[in-house]
């Protein structure tokens, strides 16, 4: 399998006081599995941002903008998954 079709180890997110990452993507995960999980993460982000549109004191235009960007990213991922 091509190296392009699997993940590489890549730390992300929060770090401790010694600058060690708490989280990392594991190497060797297939492109399809990665895209499926990415689609799930985008759905969760969309649902979270959608809840902001009903709240008080939140800039609703920014919340709707976030929804639009998340929806577009998820559409691209879903289109890649459907290609198989």
Image (cartoon, rainbow, N blue to C red):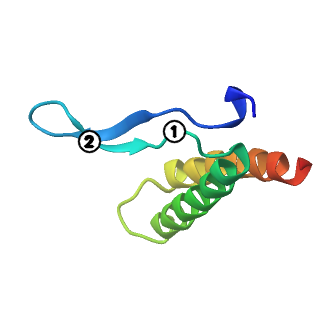
Look at the picture and state if 78 lies above or below 40. above
Measuring 44% from the left and 53% from the top, which residue is drawn there?
59
Q: Name the foreground residue: 11 vs 63.
A: 11
In terms of image quadrants, where is residue 17?
A: top left
Q: Position of residue 55 (x, y in %)?
A: 41, 70
Q: Is residue 43 left or right of residue 11?
A: right
Q: Are circles 1 and 2 on residues that touch, CB within 8 Å?
A: no
Circle 1 packing at 10 Å, graded few (<14), some (14-19), many (20+), is: few
Apparent side of residue 78 relative to residue 23 in the rendered image (left or right):
right
- Quarter holding residue 37: bottom right
Asked where in the image residue 30 lies, by quadrant, the reply is: top right
Coordinates of residue 76 in the picture (x, y in percent)? 77, 44
Residue identifier under label 1: 27
Residue 15 is tagged as none
Residue at numbered disc 2: 14
Above or below residue 73? Residue 48 is: below
Secondary structure of residue under mark 2 = strand
Q: Earlier in the sequence, mark 1 or mark 2?
A: 2
State the image coordinates of residue 54 (x, y, percent, origin top left). Answer: 48, 71
Q: Residue at x 52, y 58 (%)?
A: 45
Horizontal side, residue 51 vs residue 34: left or right: left
Establish if 66 lies above or below 1. Answer: below
Q: Secondary structure at mark 1?
A: loop
Q: Residue at x 61, y 62 (%)?
A: 40
């Amino acid at each position: 399998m091509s190296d392009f079709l699997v993940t590489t180890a890549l730390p992300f997110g929060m770090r401790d006081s010694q600058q060690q990452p708490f989280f990392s993507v594991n190497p060797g995960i297939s492109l399809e599995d990665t895209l499926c999980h990415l689609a799930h993460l985008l759905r969760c982000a969309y649902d979270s941002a959608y809840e902001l549109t009903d709240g008080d004191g939140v800039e609703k235009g920014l919340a709707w903008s976030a929804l639009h960007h998340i929806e577009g990213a998820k559409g691209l991922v879903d289109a890649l998954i459907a290609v198989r």
